[in-house]
Amino acid sequence: MVKNHAGFLVERGVPVEVLTVNQQVWRDLGLHPSVTVHTLREGEGRHPLPRGERVLVYRAPGKAIDLLRPLGRHPRHGRTAEIAVGVLERAHRRAADAFHLGVFVRGYRVVRPYLLWRVAHTRLAPALDPARFERVVACDSHAVPIAWHLARQSPRLVATLEFDRSVWDHLPVVAQAQDGEEVAAP
């Protein structure tokens, strides 16, 4: 649906920008090359909340378990220590996955839209200047807070949940020339 709407606008020479978490999905779907895609994936991954959870739940205990591995090479307790480290590693993985899916992800779903706005606001501030846009269309639940914040910054900006083609129906369809100039289609 977003691809079709973007194509409709591009045909009429309207600049289109897409803000998404995963840029590659849109490129794989065949989004028109003139559409600018801004991604939040890297910024979200570097945010202290998900990054801290990965460190505290997975990496730090994993490093501690790695420190026990040399015990498995000890001539006296080698095999027993190796088995114990393996059991500990599997128990950690189960407990970490249970915490991640049962506790962290549930809470993260609640705060993720706000977190994505903070990431977008801090990392993409020039690209998200509300003065550059006439209309923001939020196509999923995570986009709603971003659209709301942008609309709050600029009272003239229209933020909506649905794409209304009638706003651009009056524009003529243009074709892209080879050198990048827009030429009216016959």
Image (cartoon, rainbow, N blue to C red):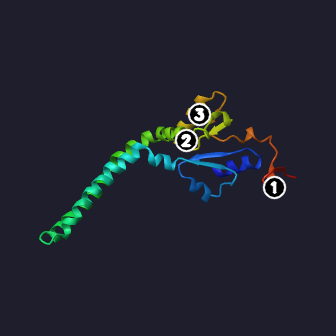
How many C-alpha atoms fall within 10 Å of the one at disc 3: few (<14), some, or many (≥20)? many
Residue bearing the label numbered 2: 143
Direction top: furthest residue: 155
Whether residue 94 appears in this view of the structure is no
Q: In this view of the protein, which residue sits in the foreground, 167 or 155?
A: 155
How many C-alpha atoms fall within 10 Å of the one at disc 1: few (<14), some, or many (≥20)? few
Residue 47, percent from left and from top: 44, 44
Element at label 2 = helix
Residue 23 drawn above or below residue 114: below
Residue 110, percent from left and from top: 42, 40
Left or right of residue 130: residue 85:
left
Residue 150 badge:
3
Residue 166, percent from left and from top: 74, 39
Q: First in sequence, mark 2 or 3: give its number.
A: 2
Residue 177 badge:
1
Q: Residue at x 65, y 54 (%)?
A: 31
Residue 169, percent from left and from top: 77, 42
Whether residue 13 appears in this view of the structure is yes
| Cα distance in 3D space between marks 2 and 3 | 11 Å
Classify residue 24 by image quadrant. Answer: bottom right
Residue type highlighted by circle 1? Ala
